[in-house]
Amino acid sequence: MELSHAYIQHPPLRFDIPGALGVMYDDGNKLLLVPAQGCIYSWPAAHHPPESKPAVTKVKEGPVLAVRFALDRKFVSIQRSDYEMEIIDLERNYAFRQRCKQKGERILGFFWSDSPVADLVFVTSGGLEMYAILQSRKGLRLMEVRRQDVSWYVYTHESRMVLLASGMQCKSLAGFQFSAGGLVRLPKFEVTITREGANRKPVLAPEDVRIATMYGRLYCLQTDRAARQLRMYRFYRDAVVPQTSLSLYSTEVAINVVDSTLVIHNTDSGVVLLFDVLSDVSQPLASPLPLTLRGAPSDEKALAPHEKELYGAGWVYLNPDLILDHKHGLLWKVRLDLEAIAASCSDPSALVGFLQRRRAEPQVGRRLTIAALQSMLAERSPLHAVGAALDVVALACASAMKVTSQALSAPSPGPSARITPAHLRLAHARPLGAPPANEATTSAQPVGEHVAASELPRLLSSGFAGPPPQREEEKPPELREGSSTTGVDKGETGEREKGGGKSGYLEGREDGGGNGRAEEDGASGGEGAEEKGRKPSAEAKGKGKVELGASPGPLSEPSQNRRWPTDRPKLSLGEIRPDDPEPSASRPSSSGRVVPPGGPPSLQNSPVWRVLSPVVPPDEVFSQVLRDAPREGSPGALYLAAVLIEHIRSLAAVDLRTPPEVYELLIRLLLQEGRAGQLTALLESKVIEPSVAVAQQLLGEAVDQPDVRSIGLSMLRTLKAHREYVDALLAFGNLTEAMRYVRHQQVEDVIPPASFLERAVTLGNKQLLAAVYRFCVDSIPGFANSPDQRLYLPVLQQQVAAGGEGAPW
Amino acid sequence: MFSAKNESVWGEALRMYVFDLRRGRQEGQEAEKILFFYPREVSLDQQKLMVGLSEGLLTFTKLFSPDQPCEALYTEKHRHIFFECEPSVWMVLVVKRGSPGGVDPTLRDDALRAVLQEAYRIFVFFNGDFENLLARDPSGAALRQLLDRTLSDHLHNLLGGKRGQHLPSLGTGLSERGCLAHLPVDRHTSLSVQSLFGLVQTAQYQGGPSLNSMLLYSGLCVASTLQASDAATLQWYIRNYIATSSRRSSLPSAMPPVSSASTGFKAGVRSLFSNMTGGGSAAAAHRSASQNSLQGTPDSSRPASPGPSGEPVSDAESIPSREGLTAQCEPSTSGQVRPLRGASWWRQADGWMVTDAWRGGVQPSVYLEGGRKRAWLHIYQQSGLMLVLLLPVDNQLTSLLPPPLLEKITARLRSLEAVVANQFGGPNGTHVPGYRYLYVDRSTEKMQASPAGKAGTLAKESLAALNQIRGEKDEEKASAKLSPSIPESSTEVYLRAQNNAWVVVKKTDTHELYVVLERVSETLVAASEMMDRFDTDILGGLFQGG
């Protein structure tokens, strides 16, 4: 098989319908729509293998300029002309028409929104018109008009953002986000276009601008063909900040975003460049390789020639990761070959960061993460690199566990609790700027309502394969929005928005970008860990710096300064996030952390979050990476010990519990290398947490280290492990101390008297035996006339007699 | 400390000597036994007389107690304290009894013996153990020379109350020689420090030196990978010799990298602050000076020479010109190690500490684990933090820390410093109001005590009672050693002093706690409650189990 980092999977979705009026992609519902005379065919785009039979929706005949289903799929809107829309209530089979309000303006397009400000938005040449569906469901009510000259527009449902282009060169862009908190208006910004000819003023074309959502962040990507640059602008709540520019090696480029990875197709040369915005974007993630077609039948004849053709003339690159071949009626999905990327990546710690951010193929991500860690240890990579990689892994794990546990612990009213847009509007009819703090958390509470444990497996599969069709009809459309990527399962969060968590997401932003914080922490660990301190906050800043430097003033700071898990005061300036599936539950609520450190024990073993994301839980890091790591010779052992300490540090930084096996191995290595001093320091400072197991290991293995043994002993005492402590004292022959302890702690019942007596006999000290006997008689209830007494009294008498002394009692 | 000036008077009449019972067995060769005698001015006959008395006493008491012969001898005017530092090698301390000019007659023996133990540990730390030295030079000349230098210097400083040292007295009852003063930090900080150690440790794998590190803040040990006793001795040295000299040379340490334009002035400043030993200290002068001195150094066992690229080690090795040194010390000692005499350390602009104590441009080295291992001593200072690296001498490193790694370490130290500084309670950070205490963990040689200034406020009666009870406990310990079949057990003693203060001793096999409660003129119950509170709050319930 040809090597490639990105590929398209055979078979594609085939939608060759005779008499079709065109093909459209409804990204709100992830449906491929083919209108024909009298009906609309629709295929879910996210399924693999693709559905061969489309769903059919009957509509009136007539011209169809554009079609979109409502997000709950109860309505379908059809643009019939430049001035008129037809909206059909699919449940009641009732249709009505709506003309655009501004006279003389043309409808450029429209989209359904789940924000409280509108259900349906028309983009006209005169601006935005926002409509709500009447309670009677028989018409539209105009909610708001935003007047502005519009040459063309770009909208993605993923970001809920529309960019309106205006001006002679169309390079002035105005952004509006239809977020759950309401309409967010972004400052206008102008993109830079390089002149190509001497006199021609370049005009920005819609295909040169793209709204991309990566790791829950919103970017505007602008292709400047003349300058061979891809300019990135990042949207914040109140600012649009130019970020880096990527050099393009061709003028013929197309863009996809696959699993938050920027995929730049050089269509003329056929190669693909991959960029990860959370890594170093100055160079591609992996070397450029061509796009390939995979999974094609080996039989050449079974494969139609047009299906083999890559970068054909009819290819259109849809947001985020689809390629539509309208000429041949095919829909491809772009995928990443993580294994190939991992194989060609030279920086293993950056690679681990990248892998831990993969949501599309968690299992592969996990496997490759483990492999990367293994090879780092085998090659004895510098410790700071290993530490950085372990930080990323621990952070990702902590975030994933937190998210899942919150989802699971939330009440579960059942999937039928649906809320219509009208309800939502009522629920959120309050000023945009003043979201009450408490409500953010309370209203976010039902976030997990659909994510009952029984539902999770289904949700898990909804990433790419999509849920089974019949379920799909029941579910809110957002469920299939599975792309935006973040730390959380897509389905889960899609439902959240319906489920009343809606307000959560504006508040999430207000809260200093808390929304998606968990994910970003995981994502940023890669770079952040390099210079980070021990706290996640410090680490997050490492990432934050980049954006801070570029952003004007303090505006974006709150959003960057991810103090986690400490809560931050509310700040009105925040970063705009897409309407991404990051549930507000994934951020720490202002009332503190919901999950106890380390998460509930049951969750640590719960497979749920393991399936959701590529995290490698601590015990797996140990069993897969650390336990069998090479440790030949003294340097090897000391290196491994240092790695173990890094592992403990990275876990402690995110409040995860260290598996006891880590301590066990660390103690063994240090003892074996004669580093008693270091071991003592680790025990003293509780880096190795005191436990009965640790104490017993110290007592058992540090045979020639009395100091270390005595630490073990006092550890048992402070842990109040009576039985073990007394046993250890007995083993050392310290009987009087053991008896004193037993009496002092009043734990006479814990230790069988026979063990004292037997030890005294073996020590051969008859005074001691007498003392022990007396102790048993006095202190241990039921000792008199017990078999023990009958056994040991003669022994004592015998010894005393042999010594020729009187009875000592 | 501990009003050392008033109480160190008795030191004037002090004698300390070291002798080897295996040597000089023939009549007329008695002088052969003597390895060291202080003060030097005492006539040889007098020396022989004193050593002879000690030997006779030891031989006699060995008849009754072969393993632990004589521990101390009380004469009318003097006290003799014995300490067998190595098999058959004895150290004896003779002090005058009673005032004037003598030690307090009630002062416990172990407080005096600790002076001997400390002297021995320090000697070994810098020179290795006697056995090795005697094996190398059976004539004992080398050992005698080293003892003479090291211990004389040490005693000179000790008796003079110099460099913050003090002789034991009743007033120092709440202190313990040879223990490590710790700065307790939280688990996260500890992990960061250990992670830093790991970074240093794994910086070089080829050849795999087992490198030891120690991090100090304001003279307190934050963490170390050393064995407890080594850590304690190293800390003793750093606190008394390095920290003080770096304080004196605080101006040079604050200097930016030396630029050629202003070297003259700065060099002058530096030499002024580095005990007038540094001659020209511009970077170039350093280099040439160190090269000069290298050529003149017979000792070739310094670490593999770093490249001329200005790596840290090479800078650390460059020392002031020799003229400055020879001007100060007698010619016979040049090229020799006198770490305790006239030595000063100062911080270079790159953060590494350099010294003139190891004459002749030799990289400082010390002996660890009772003289078994020799290690190069590197000290890196970053404001309050001092990172000590002990690199085994047998490794083949070309440079200690490659510059990129050093940058990482510096960055980490910087972030650590803020964190550690937050947890440092200041010079009186260990003070617990209402209590005057000393806590010693024998397993880790760790100690925590009331600050000297606070302990100094105790009444004489309290101190006397404390001294008495400590003495009794010392005896118990010694007798426990004699019969190991009866292990030590926990004890708890409440003693009411004449001034109604409570003196409390709590002891388990490895932990010792001495507390004086002067404000409680109340009942035993109240004192006991106070102690329980102290145990819970300060020591984490260490003594509650027993």
Image (tube, rainbow, N blue to C red):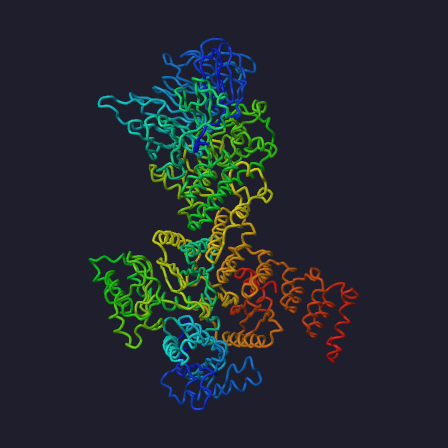
How many dots with numbers? 0
Q: Which of A545/B359 is in front?
A: B359
Q: Position of residue A692 (x, y in %)?
A: 60, 56
Residue found 50% across the figure and 68% down from its top? B438
Report the residue that reaches farthest toward the top: A61
A705 relative position to A164: left or right? right
Q: Which of B264/A639 is in front?
A: A639
With respect to residue B114, does B191 lie above or below? above
Q: Position of residue A792 (x, y in %)?
A: 75, 69
Q: Quadrant of residue A708?
A: bottom right
Residue found 36% across the figure and 60% down from its top? B380
Q: Quadrant of residue A805?
A: bottom right
With respect to residue A131, does B478 lie above or below? below
Q: Quadrant of the N terminus of chain B?
A: bottom left
Residue found 29% across the figure and 63% down from its top? B318
Residue A577 visible here: no
Q: Quadrant of the C terminus of chain B?
A: bottom right
Q: Position of residue B156 (x, y in %)?
A: 37, 77
Q: Position of residue B106 (x, y in %)?
A: 50, 80
Residue B125 visible here: yes
